Image (cartoon, helix red, strand yellow):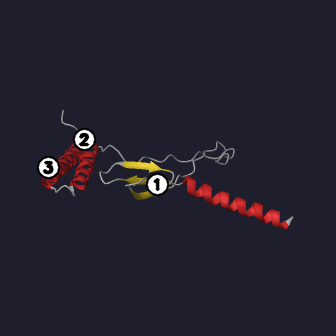
Amino acid sequence: MRPVAAIVACAALLAAALARDAAAIVRCEDAAGKVTYANTECPPNTRLVRKVEPSPPVIVHDKARPAAKAGAAPPARAEPTGNRRTADPIQEDQELTAQLAEQRRECEARAREIQRLQDDVSAAPADARASAELTLRRAQDDYKALCPRPR
């Protein structure tokens, strides 16, 4: 009976190792920047960028907190630290104006960077064009995410 138990144990360990490797998801990119996700190895003509480990789901239990004692004072409420309004509306307006000016400067710098990258794509040789286009697309995506559209 002992050899049978050893075979079963080895089979269980092998199955656990295979399940662990199968659970990993890989992110692959081709030369043009196209992204592919797979749960096996990367497809031909792509390279492994990173391995994405799926995290276990978060489980929240209703009884996770201990019950409050009878007659105990309720816990103090925490005041939010962000978005606190100042008592002086003029100071608040000046702070918001400064933040807006900084955002505009950042967006103008990003727009200049996009123009430079567009020039790089135009001047790039054929073998480096895909990389230059990918860099340009990423910069354009960052610009769209961080800079509001003019009204």
Mark 3 → mark 2, Cα distance in angstroms: 39 Å
Q: Nearer the viewer, mark 2 or mark 1?
A: 1
Position of 51 compared to 14: left or right? left
Q: Nearer the viewer, residue 140 or 129?
A: 129
Quarter of the image with the C terminus in it: top left
Q: Which badge, 1 or 3, comes first in the chain's sequence?
A: 1
Q: Which mark is residue 26?
A: 1
**Mark 3 burial class by Cα count in 10 Å: few <14, some 14-19, many 20+:** few
Q: Which badge, 3 or 2, comes first in the chain's sequence?
A: 2
State the residue position of label 2: 89
Q: Amino acid at mark 2?
A: Pro
Q: Amino acid at mark 3?
A: Gln
The image position of residue 57, as x and y in percent, is: 57, 47
The image position of residue 40, as x and y in percent, is: 51, 53
The image position of residue 150, as x and y in percent, is: 18, 36
Q: Nearer the viewer, residue 98 or 127?
A: 127
Report helix, strand or loop for mark 2. helix
Residue ranking furthest to the front: 44
